[in-house]
Amino acid sequence: MSWKDIQKEVDDWIKNVGVRYFNELTNMAILTEEVGEVARIIARRYGEQSEKESDKAKDLGEELADVIFVAVCLANQTGVDLEKAWKKRMESKTARDKERHQANEKLKKDDGK
């Protein structure tokens, strides 16, 4: 599935199920909330905090999908073509980082995982 397909699927869902897009500020707040839910799972499941019983059933994949959904909503609302933006970002990151990470001694260390 392409980004174009994802953007259309989200737009169709909003129009047929969601009634309309929340405004951009509301969606930004929702995005922040969803990222916080991902952070909570990561901190408790993979970090040093203990995981509460009520958090054990939370699905990290679903929470990441929530982040993507709201980010796509914001892209749709603001006219961002994610296909084009993704390609541009990956080209930029590759040009900027193609030697940097390979030369990073910290990444060559085995952290025991």
Image (cartoon, rainbow, N blue to C red):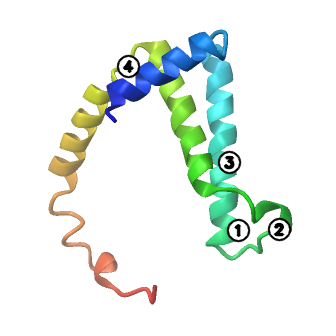
Q: Reading the chain from its start, which is encountered first: label 1 or label 3?
A: 3
Q: Are marks 1 and 4 in contact (CB under 8 Å)?
A: no
Residue 62: x %, y % from top left: 60, 48
Residue denoted by label 1: 44
Real-space Cα separation, disc 3 to disc 2, in angstroms: 16 Å
Residue 101: x %, y % from top left: 24, 66
Q: Are marks 2 and 4 in contact (CB under 8 Å)?
A: no
Residue denoted by label 3: 36
**Amino acid under label 4?**
Val
Q: Are marks 1 and 3 in contact (CB under 8 Å)?
A: no
Numbered disc 4: secondary structure: loop
Numbered disc 3: secondary structure: helix
Residue at 51% across, 15% down:
12
Q: Reading the chain from its start, which is encountered first: label 3 or label 4?
A: 3
Decide if residue 6 is on the left or right side of residue 67. left
Q: Are marks 1 and 2 in contact (CB under 8 Å)?
A: yes
**Quarter containing the N terminus:** top left
Residue at 19% across, 50% down:
94
Real-space Cα separation, disc 1 to disc 3, in angstroms: 12 Å
Residue denoted by label 2: 52
Real-space Cα separation, disc 2 to disc 4, in angstroms: 38 Å
Numbered disc 2: secondary structure: loop
Tell us which disc is closer to us: 2 or 4.
2
